[in-house]
Image: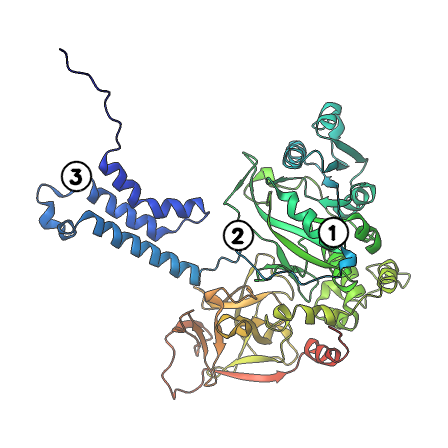
């Protein structure tokens, strides 16, 4: 009797399993949008050692003598590898400069609101301002339609802002509009992002109006928290976590890591930051949800703003100061195409009138800053004393914004800063003093080389120059939250009236600066002016990272810090209270919580 034949057993070779285990941690880091060199390098080193044929080719027959690590079990080698890789990940996590938002992390709960503000929104209008977006407009429309239930989506309003050819005759023809529930508003000529959003918001008929850019892919379920959070308070604006969009596949990449929060700077600009609470001081601008009722009550957007820029500042302050609030939906993700100079597909297909953004920002600042508008004198592009030929302010009449301010009995800008004191006080944006840093060896002062306000490329440098009384580029102050002191100020040094903080010394013998991380999470921005007169950097484990030492020839170099008792390298020069601190302290007594 013939023996029964059995099917061959399917099995995975043990060395394949071993290789997978070797590469487990590096592969997991890639899945979470992080690729660190050392874990990959360690896995690459161990892989040929664990494969007998490869090992023999590299080291010959006497590998056991040449490689003492082979005398221990394979599991122990893997354990050592995992410990080293995990240790490096922990170090990276503690000291990395990554400032994005881990959207899946928990945060503080929202404060209780007046029950009379609760309601039940039943429909959504999505507004897409599109200028020269072409195929991106269709892809965005499709993504919105497919990620939003039919029972909730009242309409997708596409505002075609002067596209050529018109979207109605190209990518959003009648068939596409019918299929994806699109209402098309056409501007024969480009009026700009702000005008397009205002026209779309005014035309929307849904209970909630959602504004997206015309190059996004909302992720499944994005709408749920929008409706829930706005339903708890009709005066609440909601923003999603803004992630990264791969324009080739039109899919989210890098996982759910993204950004949601901005803060307002003295030059009427905004910067991304992160904090543990769900509240958002300032919108980034393009992606948000608002009830149609609150849109109408606050007046929507300033119709006198032109083109692009500044409308997010105005809308944020309208909401916070006039009885509303802005929160992030930590479980709502919208992938967004970020413009890149190296990728022509992402370049804007429209132009913005020169100076329009500055005028818009000035309008928002003058209208809402109140007495703090005095700070605008430090920024030439926002100077408020410039007039047109007929004697009117160069940024135009702001009576329409002031009418909203009076009608809604809005609070002061000092209230806003006190409400977000973890940003403005703990983050060092209202310094109690500014001062010069004079090199003891030369008598020259550390001078920031850029213009006041926002650095165009996010970086800067400072050098030694003759001290000049009244030169604001020679004024510095303490900045950034100190994570070792429960987030109180300060852990770094900032160039006054700029967005730049010291990060170290450069190859050109100058001090390097970068956009300040007010949350205090960047290890390279932990610098202190010590009581004994040194500019000393520290790591997160409180070890000295060296000092910035001025030389007699004017160079500034990173060096080991001088021993105790060594003469001071730097002298604090002419400390003084800045106007923002003086005005804020005066206003605190009038602020109602």
Which badge, 1 or 2, is on the more N-terminal residue? 2
Label drawn at residue 104: 2
Asked whether 258 or 123 is in front, the reply is 123
Q: Position of residue 32 (x, y in %)?
A: 45, 47
| Residue drawn at point x = 71 percent, y = 48 percent | 289
Question: Does residue 292 sit above or below 151 in this rendering?
Answer: below
**In-image side of 355 versus 6 (left or right):** right
**In-image side of 337 versus 14 (left or right):** right
Where residue 401 sits, quadrant-wise, is: bottom right
The Cα atoms of the two marked residues, 3 and 2, are separated by: 42 Å
- Which class describes the residues within 10 Å of circle 3: few (<14), some (14-19), or many (20+)? few
Q: Position of residue 327 (x, y in %)?
A: 66, 56
- Which class describes the residues within 10 Å of circle 2: few (<14), some (14-19), or many (20+)? few
SS of the residue under disc 1: loop
Question: Does residue 457 sit above or below 14 in this rendering?
Answer: below
Q: Which residue is mark 3?
A: 52
Which badge, 3 or 2, is on the more N-terminal residue? 3
Q: Position of residue 202 (x, y in %)?
A: 83, 44
Q: Which residue is mark 1?
A: 354
| Residue drawn at point x = 23 percent, y = 23 percent | 8
């Amino acid at each position: 009797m013939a023996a029964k034949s059995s099917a061959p057993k399917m099995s995975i070779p043990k060395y394949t399993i071993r290789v997978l285990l070797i590469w487990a941690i590096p592969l997991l880091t890639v899945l979470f949008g992080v690729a660190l060199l050392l874990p990959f390098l360690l896995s690459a080193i161990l892989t040929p050692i664990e494969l007998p044929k490869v090992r023999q080719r590299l080291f010959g027959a006497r590998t056991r003598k040449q490689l003492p690590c082979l005398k221990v079990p394979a599991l122990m080698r893997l354990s050592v590898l995992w410990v080293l890789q995990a240790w490096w990940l922990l170090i990276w996590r503690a000291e990395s400069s990554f400032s994005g938002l881990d959207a899946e992390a928990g945060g503080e709960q929202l404060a209780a609101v007046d029950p009379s503000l609760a309601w039940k929104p039943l429909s959504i209008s999505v507004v897409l301002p599109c200028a020269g977006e072409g195929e991106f407009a269709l892809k965005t429309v499709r993504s919105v339609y497919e990620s939003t239930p039919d029972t909730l989506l009242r309409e997708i309003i596409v505002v075609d802002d002067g596209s050529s050819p018109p979207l109605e005759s190209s990518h959003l023809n009648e068939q596409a509009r019918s299929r994806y529930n699109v209402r098309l508003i056409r501007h024969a000529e480009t009026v700009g992002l702000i005008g397009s959003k205002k026209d779309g918001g005014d035309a929307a008929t849904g209970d909630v109006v959602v504004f997206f850019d015309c190059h996004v892919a909302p992720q499944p379920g994005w709408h749920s928290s929008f409706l829930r959070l706005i339903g708890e308070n009709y005066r609440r604006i909601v923003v999603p976590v803004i992630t990264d969009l791969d324009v080739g596949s039109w899919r989210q990449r890098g996982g759910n890591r993204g950004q949601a929060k901005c803060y307002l700077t003295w030059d009427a600009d905004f910067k991304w930051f992160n904090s543990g609470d769900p509240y958002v001081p300032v919108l980034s601008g393009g992606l948000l949800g608002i009830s149609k009722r609150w849109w109408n009550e606050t007046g929507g957007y300033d119709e006198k703003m032109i083109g692009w820029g500044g409308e997010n500042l105005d809308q944020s302050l309208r909401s916070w100061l006039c009885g509303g609030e802005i929160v992030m939906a930590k479980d709502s993700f919208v992938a967004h195409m970020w413009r890149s100079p190296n990728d022509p597909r992402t370049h804007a297909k429209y132009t913005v009138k020169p100076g329009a953004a500055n005028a818009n920002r000035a309008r928002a600042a003058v209208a809402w800053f109140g007495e703090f508008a005095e700070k605008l004198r430090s920024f030439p592009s926002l100077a408020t004393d410039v007039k047109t030929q007929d004697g009117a302010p160069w940024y135009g009449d702001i009576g329409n914004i002031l009418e909203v301010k009076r009608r809604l009995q809005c609070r002061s800008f000092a209230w806003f800063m006190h409400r977000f004191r973890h940003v403005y006080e703990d983050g060092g944006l209202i310094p109690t003093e500014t001062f010069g840093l004079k090199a003891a060896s030369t008598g020259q002062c550390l001078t920031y080389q850029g213009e006041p306000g926002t650095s165009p490329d996010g970086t800067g440098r400072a050098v030694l120059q003759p001290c000049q009384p009244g030169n604001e580029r020679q004024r510095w102050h303490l900045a950034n939250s100190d994570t070792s002191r429960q987030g109180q100020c300060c852990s770094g040094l900032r160039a006054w009236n700029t967005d730049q903080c010291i990060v170290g010394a450069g190859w050109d013998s100058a001090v390097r600066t970068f956009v300040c991380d007010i949350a205090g999470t960047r290890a390279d921005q932990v610098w202190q002016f010590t009581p004994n007169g040194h500019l000393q950097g520290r790591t997160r484990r409180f070890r000295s990272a060296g000092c910035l030492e001025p030389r007699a020839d004017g160079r500034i170099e990173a060096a080991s810090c001088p021993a105790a008792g060594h003469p001071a390298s730097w002298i604090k020069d002419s400390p003084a209270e800045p106007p923002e601190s003086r005005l804020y302290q005066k206003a605190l007594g009038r602020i109602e919580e």
